């Protein structure tokens, strides 16, 4: 399985898991709120002994609250209880119907909506005591969350792929900076000489000298040119002896390979050679 396919699969599984977890959590929370509505309906009629029966899910968006005994409720009390309790959990669009237990006849109903005009045709009515169920239908609102879950992977996957390619390219570039020098490898970026199990650190000036000599291997590098490149451009004035000392230090750090020579061409400059 390719890396790209694994990333796609990971996002898909994450989407399924998170959607399921959120859906279950919301359902449990709503059931608690609906039972609270039932208990408040009983309290409003002075009934402290009757029970709220298990909440019934009639369909995807409709819940039914039932009671074990007849209840008494006014339309205004039911309206206020419903709006308050459902509003606490962010449900602002729903239809409530009070139905007879056996007949399914609608005794009273109202629509509450934050986005539309609420409709309460049965306001101010006193309902006779009887066996009733409260049927609540949640009105669906346009939900673009699914679109976000589609767009996020579509945006992130190309970005991750580009990042992966750039990281791979940078790693490749880092490898190319390990310049071969006899049995050594010269790591320019980290200023290190790598030799089998040995690693030798270079100072900034040692690394600069070696870079210049290596760029013109087997060619004589003029003393004045070397001194100018290593020191003068940094605003530091030195004497020829400083270059000789620097070359001596670099020779010692290359001493594990006898085929590498930094030759002094008298009166002219230095030359880096690697013998076959």
Image (cartoon, rainbow, N blue to C red):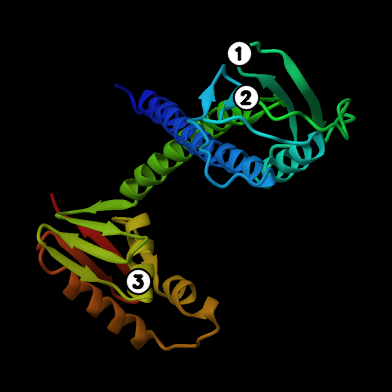
Q: Nearer the viewer, residue 96 or 70?
A: 70
Measured in 3D between alpha carbons, the distance from the residue under mark 2 to the one under mark 3, in whole angstroms, is: 110 Å
Work out whether mark 1 precedes mark 3 in sequence or the reverse, and give the earlier one.
1
Q: What kind of element bears circle 3?
A: strand
Left or right: residue 7 compared with residue 27:
left
The residue at the far front in this view is 129
What is the quadrant of the N terminus in the image? top left
Q: Nearer the viewer, residue 30 or 182?
A: 30
Q: What kind of element bears circle 1?
A: loop
Do the residues under discs 1 and 3 have CB atoms within 8 angstroms?
A: no
In the rendered image, the vertical position of residue 261 relative to residue 44, given as above or below: below
- Which quadrant of the structure image shows residue 112? top right
Work out whether mark 1 precedes mark 2 in sequence or the reverse, and give the earlier one.
1
Q: Which label belongs to residue 131?
A: 2
Q: Residues within 10 Å of mark 1 (few under 14, many from 20)?
A: few
User: Can you give x and y, in whole percent of width and height, for residue 172 in the image?
Assistant: 35, 42
User: Can you give x and y, in whole percent of width and height, for residue 124 in the image?
Assistant: 88, 35
In the rendered image, the vertical position of residue 175 relative to residue 162, given as above or below: below
Query: Which is closer to the viewer, label 1 or label 3?
Result: 1
Residue holding disc 1: 102
Q: Is residue 216 visible?
A: no
Mark count: 3
Measured in 3D between alpha carbons, the distance from the residue under mark 1 to the one under mark 3, in whole angstroms, is: 110 Å
User: Can you give x and y, in whole percent of width and height, for residue 70 in the image?
Assistant: 61, 29
Q: What kind of element bears circle 2?
A: loop
Q: Residue at x 34, y 69 (%)?
A: 207
In the rendered image, the vertical position of residue 181 relative to residue 16, given as above or below: below
Residue holding disc 3: 269
User: Can you give x and y, in whole percent of width and height, for residue 160 in the image?
Assistant: 47, 37
């Amino acid at each position: 399985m390719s890396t790209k396919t694994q990333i796609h699969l990971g996002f898909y599984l994450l989407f399924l898991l998170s959607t399921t977890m959120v859906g279950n959590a919301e359902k449990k929370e709503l059931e608690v709120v609906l039972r609270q509505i039932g208990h408040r309906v009983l309290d409003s009629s002075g009934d402290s002994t009757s029970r709220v029966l298990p909440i019934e899910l009639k369909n995807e968006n409709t819940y039914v609250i039932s009671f074990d005994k007849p209840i008494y409720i006014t339309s205004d009390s039911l309206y206020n209880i419903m709006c308050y309790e459902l509003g606490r959990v962010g449900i602002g669009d729903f239809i409530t119907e009070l139905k007879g237990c056996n007949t399914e006849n609608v005794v009273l109903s109202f629509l509450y909506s934050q986005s539309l005009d609420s409709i309460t045709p049965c306001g101010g009515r006193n309902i006779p005591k009887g066996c009733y169920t409260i049927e609540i239908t949640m009105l669906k609102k346009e939900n673009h969350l699914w679109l976000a879950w589609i767009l996020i992977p579509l945006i992130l996957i190309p970005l991750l792929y580009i990042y992966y390619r750039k990281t791979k390219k940078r790693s490749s570039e880092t490898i190319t900076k390990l310049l071969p020098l006899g049995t050594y490898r010269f790591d320019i970026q980290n200023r290190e000489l790598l030799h089998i199990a040995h690693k030798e650190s270079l100072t900034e000036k040692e690394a600069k000298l070696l870079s210049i000599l290596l760029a013109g291997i087997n060619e004589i590098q003029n003393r004045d040119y070397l001194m100018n490149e290593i020191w003068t451009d940094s605003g530091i004035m030195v004497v020829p002896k400083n270059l000789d000392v620097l070359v001596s230090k670099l020779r010692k750090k290359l001493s594990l390979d006898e085929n590498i020579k930094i030759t002094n061409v008298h009166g002219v400059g230095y030359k880096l050679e690697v013998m076959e």
